[in-house]
């Protein structure tokens, strides 16, 4: 693990996270020892649009119980559980942060989908899985923490079978070239943030052996998502019992505020890209 990765692990590690999630479930009247996968949606889909964005992506893909799925940067495992539940497919999640892998594994066990999900500690630029082992790979709000986009795409291509699909949904640079302001959900400091223009992704994908199938800007979805998150905290006068603020710590409000400011002025925009591996 290099120095940047070490800082990122610290950024995403939250002490007592599982206990806080269980406490939030209980406060909402859910069974913290036997939650349903949908009970965790307020907290376990840590990307703009949350479960709504995930479902919109899944609706554009062909997945069945035999599809071998890899979630790169799997976090708390929400996307993996959504796929395992919806399609009965087996999903492997890889994340750099050991604490998130541990919590994701336990949440899947509590939800009863532990047999269809596996979570492994590893880097997106050095995936600890075999060549051609998957039919579909997803990368949801991870590339902002990765400087070397070409290595990222080459690794994705290596682990995908012939004609495998690679879905990328990342925060990218917009038309406004002004400097980003921190903290933001993915980084507390400039040194661990690598937000690139869509062209950087397209070029890396082509060089790694992918063909772009579709692309769409999801700024409207992201704006509505974070606006709702802000409104919920304002209405309650405190953060809700369960939400993505649990992953962002005490600076959650400022991170969301900075995100919305830069989204509004065109410095950032969340973009969804779907690629197919060349034969």
Image (tube, rainbow, N blue to C red):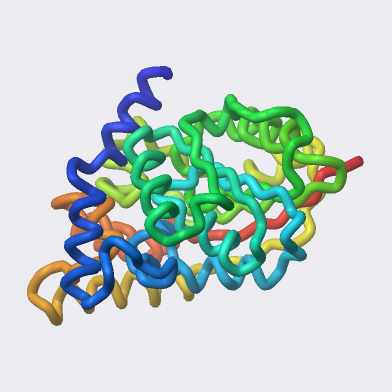
Query: Residue 107 appears at what percent x and percent y?
Result: 38, 54
Query: Which quadrant holds residue 263?
Result: bottom left
Query: Residue 137 appears at what percent x and percent y?
Result: 66, 47
Q: Is residue 56 above or below residue 156?
A: below
Q: Quadrant of the N terminus?
A: top left
Q: Please name the residue shown 60% across and 72% down the image.
A: 56
- Residue closer to the observer: 26 or 258: 26
Q: Residue lying farthest top?
A: 2
Q: Residue lying farthest right?
A: 279
Residue 84 in view in this figure: yes
Q: Is residue 53 above or below residue 6?
A: below
Q: Please name the residue shown 42% across and 61% down the image.
A: 111
Q: Quadrant of the C terminus?
A: top right
Query: Residue 36 appears at what percent x and percent y?
Result: 40, 69
Q: Is residue 173 above or below residue 235?
A: above
Query: Residue 174 appears at what percent x and percent y?
Result: 50, 57
The reply, left or right, for residue 9 in relation to residue 254 is right
- Residue closer to the observer: 277 or 193: 277
Q: Residue lying farthest bottom?
A: 235
The reply, left or right, for residue 206 in relation to residue 139 is right
The reply, left or right, for residue 66 in relation to residue 14 is right
Q: Please name the residue shown 38% across and 35% down the image.
A: 97
């Amino acid at each position: 693990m290099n120095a940047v990765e070490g800082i990122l692990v610290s950024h995403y590690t939250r002490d007592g996270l599982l206990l806080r999630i269980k406490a939030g479930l209980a406060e909402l009247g859910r069974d913290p020892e036997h939650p349903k996968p949908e009970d965790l949606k307020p907290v376990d889909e840590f990307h703009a649009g949350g479960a709504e964005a995930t479902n919109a992506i899944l609706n554009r893909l062909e997945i069945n119980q035999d599809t071998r799925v890899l979630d790169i940067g799997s976090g708390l495992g929400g996307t993996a559980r959504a796929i395992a539940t919806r399609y009965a497919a087996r999903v492997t999640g890889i994340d750099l942060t050991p604490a998130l892998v541990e919590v994701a594994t336990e949440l899947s066990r509590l939800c009863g989908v532990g047999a269809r999900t596996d979570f492994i500690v590893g880097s997106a630029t050095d995936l600890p899985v075999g060549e051609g082992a998957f039919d579909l790979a997803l990368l949801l709000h991870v590339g902002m923490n990765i400087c070397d986009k070409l290595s990222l795409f080459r690794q994705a291509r290596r682990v995908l079978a012939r004609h495998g699909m690679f879905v990328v949904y990342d925060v990218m640079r917009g038309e406004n070239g002004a400097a980003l302001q921190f903290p933001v959900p993915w980084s507390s400091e400039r040194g661990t943030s690598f937000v690139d223009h869509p062209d950087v992704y397209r070029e890396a994908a082509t060089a790694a052996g992918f063909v772009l199938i579709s692309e769409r800007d999801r700024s409207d979805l992201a704006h509505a998502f974070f606006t709702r998150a802000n409104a919920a905290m304002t209405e309650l006068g405190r953060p809700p019992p369960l939400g993505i603020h649990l992953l962002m710590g005490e600076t959650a409000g400022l991170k969301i505020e900075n995100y919305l400011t830069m989204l509004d002025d065109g410095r950032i925009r969340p973009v969804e890209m779907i690629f197919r591996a060349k034969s």
